[in-house]
Image: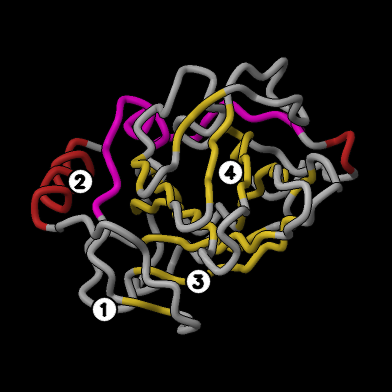
Amino acid sequence: MNCLIKSAVVIATALACTASPALADDDYTTDAVTPSWTAASAESCSDPDTAPLLSSFDDDDLYAPAPGGGFDGGAGGWQLENGASVGGASSGLNVLGMSTGSLSLPAGASAVSPTFCVDERYPHFRFSYVQESLEEDAGIRVEVVYPGLAKDNVRKAKDVKAKHGRGWELSDRIKLNPTHGLKRGGWRLLAIRLSVKDDKPDARVRVDDVLIDPKARL
């Protein structure tokens, strides 16, 4: 565990953070992204307490919140760029209890989660979202960041369509690919980057309840 924390410090020192994400259609990029390392990141490097948080959505997998993924205490280590902010929850799905905060992403904005530890038992993650514009749909680009890889260190995991007038929705299961770039399994650091495309200037999306699936099934 101590070695893992030391490795995280080295990675964070070695990499430089870009001001905005590359929104090309490539599956992988070599963006230099430096996710933060928080106390919640350290706590994630052992099997967390889990619960079937999405059972009311016909998903009985066991989940735990990503570091800062509830946004109730502010940004919680998430790196916010180009107008991203944390504000009121705006009546979210409240899967972690009554929510008091959510991530706000206007067109062109992005947010990078703190690092969290996963291994091959951590297959995917989900989050809730809503499009706040009255007239425009929005595209959310979802990426997984693999700090420390020399190449293919940012993977486009999914493009999510946030449709206006639909209210809060839950994303599909999105793959983490925890063994990407490794010759063998084991604990490793990942992060998530969420971006809203800037092709519709009035688009604004809110995100809440970012959940990691550490054990796949009950």
Which circle marks residue 156 in the picture?
A: 3
Query: Predominant secondary structure in magenta?
Result: loop
Circle 1: is it few (<14), some (14-19), or many (20+) Cα within 10 Å?
some
Q: Amino acid at mark 4?
A: Ile
The reply to whether callout 2 and callout 1 are in contact (CB within 8 Å) is no
Q: Nearer the viewer, mark 3 or mark 2?
A: 3
Which circle marks residue 212 in the picture?
A: 4
Circle 3: is it few (<14), some (14-19), or many (20+) Cα within 10 Å?
some
- Considering the numbered disc 3 on the image, is that residue within a helix, a strand or a loop? strand
Q: Which residue is mark 1?
A: 151
Q: Amino acid at mark 3?
A: Lys
Q: Which residue is mark 2?
A: 8
Residue depicted at 67% across the width and 60% down the height: 138
22 over 68 or under it: above or below: below
Q: CA distance from mark 1 to mark 3?
A: 14 Å
Q: Amino acid at mark 1?
A: Lys
